[in-house]
Image: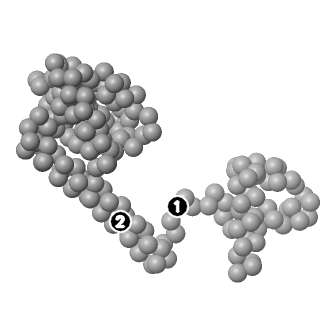
Amino acid sequence: MKKVGYLRVSTEEQKPDRQIDGLKPLCDILHIERFSAVAKKRPVFERVMRQLKSGDTLVVWDLDRAFRNTIDALTQAEKLRARGVEFQIVTLGVDTATADGKLVYTVLAAFAEHERNRLSERTKEGLRAAVKRGKKLGRPPAMSKRQALAAKQKLANKEATIAELAALNGVHPWTLTRSLRRLEEVVEE
């Protein structure tokens, strides 16, 4: 019966120190992963989940350090419980070994999912508002309208090929082709 700590940071630049300091006194072993929670593969997490045995406890610093969303959290917690493995969230004082811990865990997981959904909604609303005010979203075009017009003229006069003009403008030939298509779309409108 071991207490197995799992901690995760999303990028190489992020430091897991806070999680290590919080989990080290509570756990027999720590597993550190550097991947986004939404990454398709999280090898350390998958290995830890496979290695847990009946009587073990999976310990995480916070709910979002281990699971992608509420459904994932509840599904994984149920799978752990079916295998005789308990689950502990340190920052929330939740321990699924107790009935109260199970209840609190379920409610907290739902609130975490709700907050992620609200954040997504707010982001989309902000983007729509920016577009409504005339803000152009995304990367700026690699070529200006003036550059595209000059390239179009040289192509029409057979002064250069697309590859040569792309190299002259420091872009890929496909980028030049898209710039020329955008010019045509503007004319057609």
Picture residue at 30% right of the left edge, 42% below the top: 75
Q: Quadrant of the C terminus?
A: bottom right
Q: Would residue 22 be seen by someone viewing this image from the given angle?
A: yes
Residue 87, picture quadrant: top left
**How many residues crowd mark 2 within 10 Å: few (<14), some (14–19), many (20+)?**
few
- Viewer-proximal residue, 14 or 87? 87
- Viewer-proximal residue, 179 or 185? 185
Q: Would residue 14 be seen by someone viewing this image from the given angle?
A: no
Q: Secondary structure at mark 1?
A: loop
Q: Which mark is residue 50?
A: none
Picture residue at 22% right of the left edge, 42% below the top: 63
Q: Please give the residue where the numbered disc 1 appears in the rendered image.
A: 138
Q: Position of residue 92 (x, y in %)?
A: 12, 43
Residue 31, picture quadrant: top left
Q: Quadrant of the N terminus?
A: top left
Picture residue at 38% right of the left edge, 70% below the top: 125
